[in-house]
């Protein structure tokens, strides 16, 4: 492992020094995937301390027997709380355990704590290296934000001189498929709004909302096509007037799509399905230009060309056995696009492309299986911000919910829906409800991937280890959902749950739940797809 912030932590764990180590880890540093792997390689096993009763069950069935059997296994009990909270642990743990404390403040002493704390663990490598290289003096809030924007996100408002620079920055930001945390987005927004030339751009939305940027670009793509088809022969004022009156987002009508870096990024968005090709009366003329990627003419040819390019891209991106989980999340979204294209009922089947798809599918299955055997075991104890596995979702939601606060949240579970099916549903929703916004992510299910295991983990906010008696049934989902939110300070009357939502006849139950004056957290299970897959019914 290269010199990094992890080494500062790893050097504190000395094998065979103590069978039990208690760690106060308020910043979830030990949730890092690579750090956990390094600890496991030298014989340590990590366990999170959350629910006292659930932990006691695990302690008596796993940890204590390993001591009795004199196994050479060393346990790390992680408490995501300040060091003072360690004293609240059971006496037998305190008596037998060595105590440690790790903090972001110690790792990044020259930066303000709150700015570092909102970063993902994967961002800390770049930040630690930048801190070691630049060695900044102690920075305040804005200085820390600027330092992080520049060295972690590669964003510097001072380098944005014109609209092309601005568009490149926005595209880079959203192509990386991770939203910019609000404090950094607000800092960047303030700096950009000081430039009069960007006054008409809806920067607040474009910086924070991927769907807003993609809609902004999609609306302006036909205007650019008209410009390219006309060349220098005629002005495009009429074209701008024709399209701009229906723009959902204000801003300049003609964008510099042809600039080299913008062109490459836009090409990627069309390939990944974030932008949709459009028809054009002069498509035959434009087919010879780079804009061909965003043109719709012959559906069968369009499908073949895009699927071929997508398979090229997927083959090059296939994650290795030691890849991070984020690589598979990105790959899964692209693979879902390929599945939708492969099975789209357009023209006759191209046997060569279909054969290539099937060959790649076999490679994907093998690669994912190999990766699971090596890396899946680390996922359950990673930080839930953002969520990595289904049981992280309630804990992630809880960050934005306060007792007695005004927030209202709904968790809608489409039981049995695959990633590629979601892409089809999402496109229909976008067409029927153009004001709807989508900020998408992915999480891993529990293995075995059966409803009873993952769905209960999802509503309980716990791994299946902590509900062994009900792991084969979904009957406890409602109780688990209520128990989690009551532990967060909500009252039973503020928590709702409904399942077996299968038709419009069930909307009355949902409406009754959502309109209850005290209701704040709702869990809903639409299981029509799952019902159909098990052969109980046909049709929607």
Image (cartoon, helix red, strand yellow):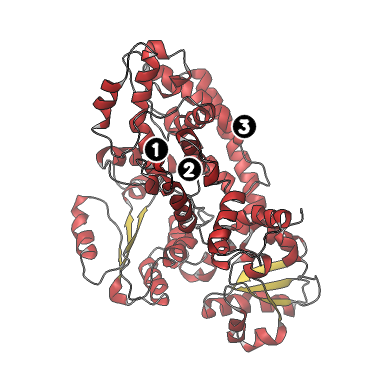
Circles 2 and 1 in contact, beta carbons < 8 Å: yes
Question: Which mark lies nearer to you, 3 or 2?
Answer: 2
Circles 1 and 3 in contact, beta carbons < 8 Å: no
Inter-mark Cα distance, 1 to 3 = 25 Å
Can residue 482 be seen here? yes
Describe residue 159's horizontal placement relative to residue 37 as left or right.
left
Which label was assigned to residue 422?
none
Q: Position of residue 289 (x, y in %)?
A: 47, 16
Q: Position of residue 223 (x, y in %)?
A: 34, 24
* First reached walking from the N terminus: tag 1 or tag 3: 1
Inter-mark Cα distance, 3 to 2 = 21 Å
Q: Quadrant of residue 486?
A: bottom left
Question: Which mark lies nearer to you, 1 or 3?
Answer: 1
Q: Mark 1 packing: few (<14 Cα in 10 Å), some, or many (20+)?
A: some
Can residue 349 be seen here? no
* Residue ID at (61%, 54%): 122
Which label was assigned to residue 174?
2
* Residue ID at (35%, 34%): 252
Asked whether 109 or 401 is in front, the reply is 109
* Residue ID at (40%, 39%): 197
Residue under circle 3?
316
Residue under circle 1?
214
Provide the secondary structure element on which disc 1 rests. Answer: helix
* First reached walking from the N terminus: tag 2 or tag 1: 2
Provide the secondary structure element on which disc 3 rests. Answer: helix
Inter-mark Cα distance, 2 to 1 = 9 Å
Q: Position of residue 417 (x, y in %)?
A: 39, 46
Asked whether 247 or 202 is in front, the reply is 202
């Amino acid at each position: 492992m290269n010199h990094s912030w992890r080494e500062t932590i790893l050097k504190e764990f000395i094998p065979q020094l103590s069978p039990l180590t208690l760690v106060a880890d308020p910043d979830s540093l030990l949730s890092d995937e690579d750090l956990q792997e390094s600890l496991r390689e030298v014989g340590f096993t990590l366990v999170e301390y959350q629910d006292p009763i659930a932990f006691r069950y695990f302690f008596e069935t796993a940890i204590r027997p390993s001591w009795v059997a004199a196994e050479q296994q060393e346990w790390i009990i992680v408490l995501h709380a300040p060091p003072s909270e360690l004293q609240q642990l059971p006496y037998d743990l305190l008596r037998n355990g060595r105590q440690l404390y790790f903090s972001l403040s110690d790792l990044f002493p020259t930066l303000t704590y709150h700015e570092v704390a909102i970063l993902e663990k994967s961002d800390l490598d770049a930040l630690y290296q930048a801190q070691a290289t630049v060695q900044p003096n102690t920075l305040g809030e804005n200085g820390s934000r600027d330092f992080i924007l520049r060295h972690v996100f590669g964003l510097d408002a001072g380098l944005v001189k014109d609209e092309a620079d601005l568009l490149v920055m926005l595209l880079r930001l959203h192509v990386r498929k991770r939203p910019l945390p609000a404090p950094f987005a607000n800092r960047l927004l303030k700096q950009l709004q000081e430039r009069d030339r960007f006054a008409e751009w809806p920067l607040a939305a474009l910086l924070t909302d991927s769907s807003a940027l993609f809609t902004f670009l999609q609306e302006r793509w036909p205007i650019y096509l008209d410009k390219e088809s006309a060349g220098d022969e005629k002005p495009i004022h009429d074209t701008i007037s024709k399209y701009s009156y229906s723009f959902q987002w204000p801003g300049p009508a003609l964008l510099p799509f042809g600039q080299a870096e913008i062109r490459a990024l836009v090409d990627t968005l069309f390939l990944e399905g974030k932008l949709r090709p459009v028809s054009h009366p002069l498509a035959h003329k434009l087919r010879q230009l780079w804009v061909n990627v965003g043109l719709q003419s012959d559906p069968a040819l369009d499908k073949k060309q895009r699927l071929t390019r997508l398979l090229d891209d997927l083959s090059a991106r296939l994650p290795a056995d030691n890849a991070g989980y984020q690589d598979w999340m990105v790959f899964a979204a692209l693979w879902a696009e390929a599945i939708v294209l492969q099975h789209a009922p357009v023209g006759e089947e191209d046997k060569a492309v279909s054969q290539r798809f099937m060959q790649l599918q076999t490679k994907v299955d093998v690669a994912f299986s190999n990766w699971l055997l090596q890396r899946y075991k680390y996922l359950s104890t990673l930080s839930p911000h953002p969520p990595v596995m289904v049981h992280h979702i309630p804990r992630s939601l809880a960050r934005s919910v306060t007792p007695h606060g005004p927030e209202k949240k709904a968790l809608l579970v489409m039981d049995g829906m695959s990633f590629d099916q979601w892409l089809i549903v999402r496109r229909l929703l976008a067409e029927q409800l153009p004001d709807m916004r989508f900020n998408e992510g992915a999480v891993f299910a529990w293995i075995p991937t059966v409803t009873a295991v993952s769905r209960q983990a999802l509503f309980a906010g716990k791994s299946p280890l902590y509900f062994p008696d009900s792991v084969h049934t979904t009957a406890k989902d409602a109780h688990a959902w209520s128990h989690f939110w009551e532990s967060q300070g909500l009252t039973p009357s503020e928590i709702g749950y409904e399942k077996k939502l299968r038709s419009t006849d069930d909307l009355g139950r949902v409406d009754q739940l959502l309109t209850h004056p005290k209701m704040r957290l709702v869990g809903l299970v639409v299981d029509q797809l799952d019902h159909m897959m098990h052969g109980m019914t046909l049709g929607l």
